[in-house]
């Protein structure tokens, strides 16, 4: 699982920060001391985890929980850490709960916002469709009006044409009769 024992050590930067926060200002810690604390903390964590794992296996579970850690600390005779760890655990759980609630609220607000945006978009699309339909109906109405006007004008023109055609027919008939007579006369003249 682990290739080298050094891989199990905690990062020196994290250990240095914990040491610096724990000690008063002006106290310095050598590099070797930080490495020693890092190795000691790693060993402590491994031992506590191993003991907690034994409690989980006895309970036929594969997942370690907070009760397993508390039982392991008691078994290791570090009972004095348990009350403080329980307080830290309670604070941690409250923070996690607050984060989950904030995330859920944010998600609900986002979904509500999306729903509102979707409704607005649908309303806009419906409004556009209604406007387009109104415009199409308006265009159709205008076309129908134009056609009716053309028909009205066309009917009036047709009546005029009929009168003109009748007049033209009489004059054309007269002209054709005259042409025939003239042609007849010219044919007789030629003979």
Image (cartoon, rainbow, N blue to C red):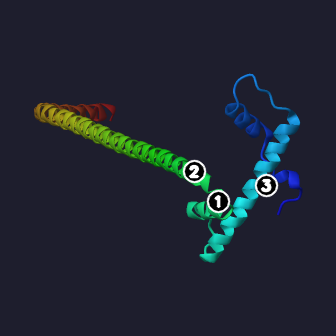
Which residue occupies the foreground of this view, 100 or 69? 69
Mark 1 and mark 3 in contact (Cβ < 8 Å)?
A: no
> Closer to us: mark 3 or mark 1?
1
Camera sees residue 160: yes
Q: Residue at x 85, y 32 (%)?
A: 30
- Residue tagged by mark 2? 85
In-image side of 37 versus 148 (left or right)? right
Task: Specify which label sits upstream in the sequence, 3 or 1.
Answer: 3
Identify the image quadrant of the C terminus: top left
**On the image, which quarter does residue 34 sit in?**
top right
- For label 3, the SS is helix
Label drawn at residue 73: 1
Is 62 situated above or below 138?
A: below
Q: Residue at x 75, y 58 (%)?
A: 46
Q: Residue at x 62, y 67 (%)?
A: 63
Identify the image quadrant of the N terminus: bottom right
Label drawn at residue 101: none
Rounded to the nearest angstrom, the CA distance separating label 3 from label 1 is: 14 Å
Which residue occupies the foreground of this view, 33 or 57? 33
- Residue tagged by mark 3? 43
In-image side of 135 versus 27 (left or right)? left
- For label 2, the SS is helix
Residue 149 image position (x, y, % from top left)? 15, 32
């Amino acid at each position: 699982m682990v290739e080298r024992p050094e891989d199990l050590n905690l990062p020196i930067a994290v250990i240095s920060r914990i040491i610096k926060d724990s000690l008063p200002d002006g106290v310095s810690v050598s590099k070797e001391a930080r490495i020693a604390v890092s190795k000691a903390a790693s060993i402590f964590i491994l031992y506590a985890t191993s003991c907690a794992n034994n409690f989980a296996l006895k309970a036929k579970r594969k997942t370690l929980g907070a009760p397993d850690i508390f039982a392991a600390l008691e078994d290791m005779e570090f009972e004095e850490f348990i009350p403080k760890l329980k307080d830290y655990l309670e604070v941690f759980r409250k923070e996690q709960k607050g984060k989950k609630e904030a995330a859920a609220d944010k998600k609900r607000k986002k979904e509500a916002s999306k729903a509102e945006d979707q409704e607005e978009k649908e309303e806009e699309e419906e409004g556009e469709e209604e406007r387009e339909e109104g415009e199409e109906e308006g265009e159709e109405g205008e076309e129908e009006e134009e056609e009716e006007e053309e028909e009205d004008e066309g009917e009036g023109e047709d009546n005029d044409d009929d009168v003109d055609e009748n007049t033209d027919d009489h004059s054309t008939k007269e002209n054709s009769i005259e042409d025939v007579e003239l042609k007849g006369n010219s044919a007789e003249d030629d003979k």
